[in-house]
Image (cartoon, helix red, strand yellow):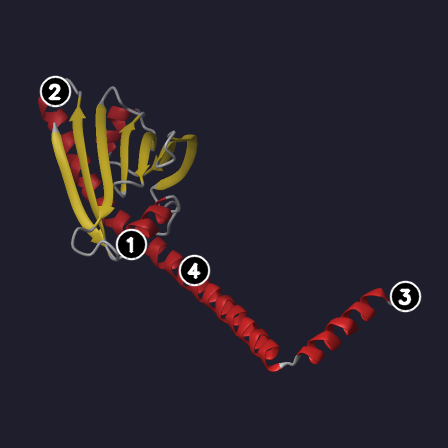
Amino acid sequence: MKLFQNRCEFAYPWEEVTEAHWKKYPNEISTHVKGTDVLRRELDPTGRKLVSERLITVQQSAPRWVMMLVGGSNISYVREVSTVDLDTHTLTLRSVNLTYANLLKVYETVTYTRDPVDPAHKTQFQQEAQITAYVPFARVCNQLEEWSVQRYHDNAEKGKRGFETVLKALSRRWDQGERYVDDISSTIVTKVNETVDDLLGADENSLLSRYSAILEAAFQPN
């Protein structure tokens, strides 16, 4: 068995990273992930945990000797179960390969957690994969595990860069949305203040005159 471990941080709040995770694929860098299909999604009775199950379709090239072992197909499928915990601010993903499982088994765990030093602006990412080959020959078994570790390393680098592009694109949308809400709020406050000032500056007779005029206009025949 070989072990692959990786950790990094994203300069975005955990809430934004968690939202962006569901839009991570496809992206222009991690092109090996061809699709994700949601199989199940459940909310626990407390309403604080969301559990999702997805089928991930992967397509990527491999050395000829690997293709001979697995049967010549470069399409594989991965089962992923994720849990979003709002109490601990943790997104945990556990996955296992469904394709070629008789030759190679990969158990992967990924967690996104709030940064302990700067939780409002940063998110910690941790990844661990246990890779075990079941080929009869020890030398080939070792080569297959080493190749898988290297492939994980390459995909991890591309995955981070790809996720950064998704986060950056969504961040622009979030900023635009916040500015839009701020503009609307500012307009509403301005209108309310103008109305209050108008009412405070008007005498009682003026207000009654306006009210009467509105009623007359409302009930006049067309």
Q: Amino acid at mark 2?
A: Phe
Label 4 secondary element: helix
What is the x, y in percent for residue 99?
31, 25
25 left or right of 191 in image: left
Observer-side mark, 1 or 3, equals: 3
The residue depicted at 27 percent of the width and 53 percent of the height is 161
Between 82 and 115, the one lying in front of the other is: 115
- Location of residue 89 (image quadrant): top left
Q: Which residue corresponds to mark 4?
A: 173
Which sits earlier in the primary sequence, circle 4 or circle 1?
A: 1
Q: Which residue corresponds to mark 2?
A: 137
How far apart in space, not on screen, are marks 3 and 2 (Cα)? 96 Å
Residue 13 is tagged as: 1
CA neighbours of label 3 inside 10 A, class few (<14), some (14 to 19), many (20+): few
Which sits earlier in the primary sequence, circle 1 or circle 3?
A: 1
How far apart in space, not on screen, are marks 4 and 1 (Cα)? 15 Å
CA neighbours of label 4 inside 10 A, class few (<14), some (14 to 19), many (20+): few
Observer-side mark, 3 or 2, equals: 3
* Any part of residue 105 in sight: yes
As drawn, the residue found furthest toward the right would be 221
Observer-side mark, 2 or 4, equals: 4
Label 2 secondary element: loop
Label 3 secondary element: loop
